[in-house]
Amino acid sequence: MVILRFLISGDPDLIRRIGSATAREVRATGIPYTFAPCVAVCRDPRWGRCYESYSEDPKIVKMMTEIISGLQGELPNNSYVSHPYIEGKNKVAACAKHYVGDGGTVKGINENDTVVTPRVLFGIHMPPYYVSIIKGVSTIMVSYSSVNGVKMHANERLVTRFLKKRLHFEGFVISDWQGLDRITSPPHANYTYSIQAAILAGIDMVMVPYNYPEFIDGLTDLVNKNVIPMSRIDDAVSRILRVKFTLGLFENPMADNSLADMLGAQENRDIAREAVRKSLVLLKNGKPTYAGGFLPLIKKQPKILVVGTHADNLGYQCGGWTIEWQGLSGNDLTIGTTILKGIQETVDPSTKVEFIENPDPATVRFSSFSYAIVVVGEKPYAETNGDNMDLTLPDPGPSIINNTCSNIKCVVVVISGRPLVLEPYVESMDGLVAAWLPGTEGKGVAEVLFGDYGFTGKLARTWFRRVDQLPMNIGDPNYDPLFPFGFGLTTEPSVQTEISLRRQRYERYAEGQAQSQENKGGNAKPESQSKGIASRRVPHLKREMDQMRELMNEMRENMRMANLVDDLVPRTDSPFIASINNHPLPLKFKMPSLDSYDGTRDPFDHIATFKTTMHVQRVLDKIMCKAFPTTLKGPARVWFSKMPLYTVSSFEELTKLFVNNFIGGQRHKCSLSNLLIIEQRENESLRSFITYFNGEALTVDEMDDKLLLVAFHNGVNSDLFIHKLYELEPQIMVELVHSAQNFMNIEDVIIAKKRKRVEQMEADLSHHPE
């Protein structure tokens, strides 16, 4: 299966399918439980576990929790919020990890201290856990790291008081591998204390790989001495049994051998390859002197060159946690396709593919290669072994890039678990692709390089220039990345692919007709007559041939336009690709009339106003690109004029670049943590609380009803109304407010009567003073 880390495709269906495929393969091994997903929000790529995190942005990580629905099954609408849920024998119990703040440690050092304010802790690192609990995640694993000096394995405030009581998590909390040992420094220095601190903090299941007799004896002694109350043991056992019952382990305790065929099944590999294709990020496509982009590559060439340490190494593609803890090198560890093999299978059969891992400059320059594909990157690592304070491209990557790209047109494919220092080499490249860790499906990379599919991926992490900028994340002051968060160029599937598919369909049809005539023997009709019959029987064939001719004409016209000198003139000061620059404005098009943006206001507001104005005219994406710069002035106009040429291929890309640059002007939006700390005050009416709660909810970005319901349950303190909520079980906020209406009306009457009674008493006292 693929090891996929940075997916920002915005495709929840794909994410669920990845989870389902993973569940099937895990179940096929006889194991009903997986330590996934990792919902850490990595804020510093120097961290050796950053590739286990989906993004620096909690919004992306929250989106990726959709994988829980794939692993465990879709939570029914009427299910109890925060209760574990597993759909059936093809699903597994999931584990959200590592709770909490492991992605925010100082300098990205693994297992270090995360020093944060409550706003950062509850607004950045905690939100993925809110969503995981709502999706019914069965277990949560505690982090080795500390939060503000307190080891998470001993943090009763965050594990019991917040996770279990405040968020009402009803699954079980599990330690990390030898997590109790690492509560003390050095590890295992006072194991009795570690057991006491961890169990009282709220850990229910403990990973003790070696010294389990010591753990059992120590825990038993602490319980017998009433240091750890039996109620804490009962709570842990109840939670573990709840998950086991939900899994059906007591009804079906043995592994199901019928699932064995699912291991490495082609349908799972197809999902993995799709994930690879959609996670690739195109960072550079061509140079300023180009009329168009360098990618997609042309399949049919006399000879092409593939170089680099990672081009033909399955172990490097998979990274750490593959077969062995720190990963392996080579192609014998598992079944899969290297990027080199994928290239060989994707190019035209007549194209010669020559592989030289580390070529000398003369060979590159004088061997008549049409172009080169350079594949370099990081070697596998896991956990602390991956901590890296300089993040330079490992040798011999730099020399391979220089020896190749200075002598021939090249695209560089980077295999890594995180951004690396690439700025010194980017100028020499014709194309640059972040492929992350594509796992066993190297052909997915080749399919996009050669245009079978287009590039669609966007950066889920800021690509920095220098390590002295770190940590640097979207929204930070002095944000100056090499490639900003959300950046990613796009391409369309190659026309050559469309034509070849249609040609193949036509050839298959012709072969079928010929075979049919052979089978009929003497009944074969004259050629001219059979053509007429074929034409009548298959009218769609003529249509497809006409479409092929149109595509061919379009290709010729594009090639002619690309060579015209005057076609270059309008592009000399524009960041848009040729198809946008050359697109004419509609005859009746009116430029948008709205206040010009100067960089000081909220960029999201400006984009929303612009879209509303443009959608009235129902214009194309290309027209929106051309019109948007007319709404800028001052610093914003200067920013647009300095954008790199030929880098923007859609309005979506333009707006992301715009927002990344002017994020400082964004109005402050609250996080879910703001709602979770709202509580109904003593003697506060339900109407007053709901009014205040709804007002605060409007300031929260990307809120949904399930999150609102959890936050409301946390805050309301009216015992009678809480009882009513559990009776009615509203699924959306509208239902909740509707059910509250009668309660509020009655409460209003009672309050009015009390007020009237008080007023009457005050009046009586004024008339009858003592």
Image (spheres, helix red, strand yellow):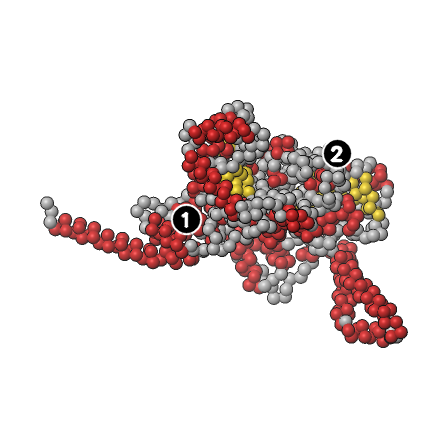
- Given residues 478 and 46, the one toward you in this image is 46
- Given residues 527 and 577, the one toward you in this image is 527
Q: Residues within 10 Å of mark 2 (few under 14, many from 20)?
A: some
Residue at (20%, 52%) from the top-left corner?
757
- Given residues 237 and 293, the one toward you in this image is 237
Q: Classify residue 540 as left or right of residue 588.
A: right
Q: Nearer the viewer, mark 2 or mark 1?
A: 1
Pinpoint residue 624: horizontal percent, then vertical percent.
61, 57
Q: Which residue is mark 1?
A: 713
Circles 2 and 1, Cβ within 8 Å, touching? The answer is no
Pinpoint residue 81: horizontal percent, then vertical percent.
47, 49
Q: Classify residue 487 as left or right of residue 347.
A: left
- In the image, residue 483 above or below residue 150: below
Q: Earlier in the sequence, mark 2 or mark 1?
A: 2
Residue at (76%, 60%) from the top-left corner?
501
Pinpoint residue 554: horizontal percent, then vertical percent.
75, 62
- Given residues 372 and 553, the one toward you in this image is 372
Q: Classify residue 222 as left or right of residue 105.
A: left
Q: Residue 396: which numbered mark, if any?
A: 2
> Is residue 200 visible to the viewer in this orientation of the structure?
yes
> Is residue 600 visible to the viewer in this orientation of the structure?
no
Three-letter code, disc 2? Pro
Three-letter code, disc 1? His
Q: Classify residue 512 as left or right of residue 58.
A: right
Residue at (36%, 47%) from the top-left corner?
717
Name the quadrant of the C terminus. Answer: top left
Task: Give the Cα distance between marks 2 and 1.
Answer: 57 Å
Q: Quadrant of residue 53?
A: top right
Q: Residue 334: which numbered mark, if any?
A: none
Pinpoint residue 26: horizontal percent, then vertical percent.
62, 45
